[in-house]
Image (tube, rainbow, N blue to C red):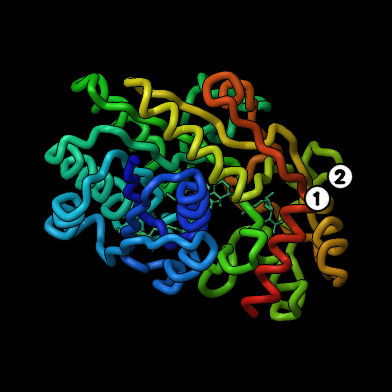
Amino acid sequence: MKTILVTGGTGFIGSHTCVELLKAGYQVVVMDNLSNSKADVVKKIETITGRTVPFYRADLLDVPSMDRIFREQKIDAVIHFAGLKAVGESVEKPLLYYQNNVSGTINLCEVMHKHDCKTIVFSSSATVYGMHNPVPMTEDMPTSATNPYGYTKVMLEQILTDLHTADPAWSVMLLRYFNPIGAHESGLIGENPNGIPNNLLPYIAQVALGKLPCLGVFGDDYDTVDGTGVRDYIHVVDLALGHIAACRYAFSHKGVEIVNLGTGSGTSVLQMIKAYEKASGRAIPFAIRPRRAGDVATCYADTQKAKDLLGWTAQRDIDQMCKDSWRFTVQNA
Ligand code: NAD
Ligand code: UFG
């Protein structure tokens, strides 16, 4: 039985991936510094799966702590979610983002190399498609970034690719996520951002709950179905299952593969508001605001490579995503 170290395993996507890994029969070890999540998530993963999960409160920047995990556990592969992800904060604190995300990942790879663990699945992002590519996004398109967060993803894709070039024993999966939303159907784990949310779904959820009065819709004059921004929202459980498929692939192939994880279809902000109103039975008051700097009109994935290479496609629709998000929101209010 293979053991997977999940960095950032108490976070939103990491926790759902732990559940699916355990259900698929893998052993899971979680490490997280809890900078954006809570330790009780480990218990919730254990409750959902009925399995035990060793947890290390550790920081990617603390090499001796990272080393200790690899000394104490026989790790076969790493799924690397740990990182900071707030675009606006990355503009204000670029060094924090480069240090945490880039230096942290370099530390992780050095420790992996030392312990002869050379299989890594990395959380990249559709943000690397930048502002100028046409939709749907294909993995061979040129990458770019408009903010330090995005640059950390562009840089880390390059660093991990170079690592494999230097040592072909590495197996590297670069997974480009589109917009993960939703929650586990148990309502036990989901997305719980600190403070006022930056992203659409957590914001809508807070408005539906009555904690925030009104959603600002950033622009209604884009060249889209109704003028509002269009994104490829993907259920976090589907995304988690994409990681299981990526792990399976990585264990049987050396090399570097870039794979989009999205549904291949777009939903506008207004369509999302309607879907959430239906799922929650609550009105979502909104007001049109100016466009947000750095936003593209439309972003959705070409999903052919995920299907061909990994045999994976997303199954859950927008209604399911909103229903599961709402259940989690109500249960954790
Ligand atoms: P999250 O913040 O919920 O999870 C990330 C976890 O990493 C958190 O629990 C945090 O405490 C931990 N962490 C951060 N820095 C660390 C460090 N130095 N050492 C140890 N732990 C550390 O975020 P998420 O939404 O689950 O995202 C996971 C990954 O996916 C991130 O790399 C993110 O950039 C990427 N991603 C997310 C999205 C999205 O919309 N959620 C989209 C594309 C890519
Ligand atoms: N939006 C609003 N109001 C809000 C928040 C968002 O109208 O309060 C709109 C945005 O303008 C955009 C859409 O809702 O059209 C989605 O916005 P999000 O902030 O939820 O998501 P983004 O696509 O902008 O970015 C997210 C992550 C990035 C990641 C990217 C691609 O925040 O880190 O998905 O994976 F890189």
Q: Position of residue 80 (x, y in %)?
A: 36, 46
Tally of numbered discs: 2
Q: Residues within 10 Å of mark 2 (few under 14, many from 20)?
A: some
Q: Amino acid at mark 1?
A: Asp
Above or below for 50 versus 313:
below
Asked whether mark 2 lies closer than 8 Å to ligand 2, one says no
- In the rendered view, tell whether residue 114 sits above or below residue 307: below
**Percent position (x, y) of residue 7?**
35, 53
Residue drawn at x 43%, y 60% is 51
Residue 299, position as x, y percentages in the image: 66, 36
Nearer to me, 272 or 234: 234
Q: Secondary structure at mark 2?
A: loop
- Where the C terminus falls, by quadrant? bottom right
Q: In the rendered image, which residue does mark 1 sit on?
A: 220
Residue placed at 24% from the left, 48% from the top? 103
* Residue 109 x %, y %: 22, 40
Query: Badge 2 is on which residue?
Result: 226
- In what quadrant of the picture does the N terminus appear? top left
Q: Is residue 69 left or right of residue 79?
A: left
Between tags 1 and 2, which lies in front?
2
Q: Is residue 266 left or right of residue 86?
A: right
Answer yes or no: is residue 101 visible: yes
Asked if one can make out residue 88 in the rendered structure from this viewpoint, the answer is: no
Decide: marks 1, 2 in contact (CB < 8 A)?
yes
Q: Could you give the CA–CA distance between mark 1 and mark 2, rounded to whole angstroms?
A: 7 Å
* Circle 1 SS class: loop
Q: Which mark is residue 41?
A: none
The quadrant holding residue 264 is top right
Quick one: label 1 or label 2, which is nearer the N terminus? 1
Residue occupying image coordinates x 17% and y 55%: 72
Q: Residue at x 33, y 36 (%)?
A: 120
Q: Amino acid at mark 2?
A: Asp
